[in-house]
Image (spheres, rainbow, N blue to C red):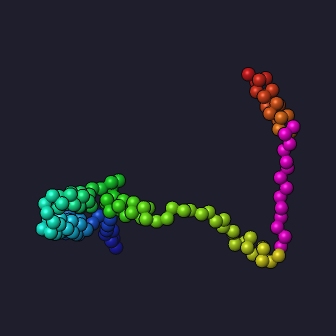
Amino acid sequence: MQFKVPQFIDVEDKLFGPFTFKQFAYMVGGVGMIFIIYKLLPLWIAIILILPIAGLTAALVFYRFNNQPFIYYLEAGLSYFFKSKLYLWQQRVPKNEKKKKEEGLPNVVSVVPQVTSSRLKDLSWSLDVQDTENK
């Protein structure tokens, strides 16, 4: 028995002509706000407010960046602007180390050998000498 697998499930349905429901809602909201501003305010003040609203409405309805709707970028920008930007690093202690500390087992301390300045000079000199010999 064969079944048909739905395809293109990430494509929204066009409900109002060439517009999806979201696009139509953005358009109706923007045009409604423009109409209210036009009726309530004098023309020269209304034009100053109408232009940004018309631009935002057009971007929400038509503009897609990287094949994503403009509303995703608007939301990301607003959340970045209003959230705190202080990031504090906190070290995570693995669960097995927590258990060891609770059990009272002694922690193993590794010994790292110290490199003295004279030893460093000897190593750098030997590297320099080997480099000049190979040339």
Report the front residue among 126 and 44. Answer: 44
The residue at the point 20 percent across, 57 percent down is 48
Is residue 88 found left or right of 61 in the rendered image? right
Toward which corner of the image does residue 18 lie, by quadrant? Answer: bottom left
The residue at the point 43 percent across, 65 percent down is 82
Toward which corner of the image does residue 128 lie, by quadrant? Answer: top right
Is residue 26 found left or right of 43 in the rendered image? right
Toward which corner of the image does residue 40 lie, by quadrant? Answer: bottom left
For residue 34, above or below residue 127: below
Magenta residue check for 132: no
Is residue 64 found left or right of 113 in the rendered image? left
The residue at the point 59 percent across, 63 percent down is 88
Screen quadrant of the N terminus: bottom left
- Is any part of residue 135 visible from this angle? yes
Q: How many labels does the image show?
A: 0
- Is any part of residue 31 visible from this angle? no
Q: Please identify the dominant SS of the magenta region.
A: loop
Magenta residue check for 108: yes
Coordinates of residue 123 in the picture (x, y in percent): 82, 35
The residue at the point 44 percent across, 61 percent down is 80
Report the front residue among 45 and 126. Answer: 45
Coordinates of residue 11 in the picture (x, y in percent): 29, 64
Coordinates of residue 109 in the picture (x, y in percent): 83, 61
- Find the magenta span and give its range: 105-118
For residue 113, above or below residue 47: above
> Hey, which residue is sitting farthest bottom in the picture?
103
Coordinates of residue 127 in the picture (x, y in percent): 79, 31
Screen quadrant of the C terminus: top right
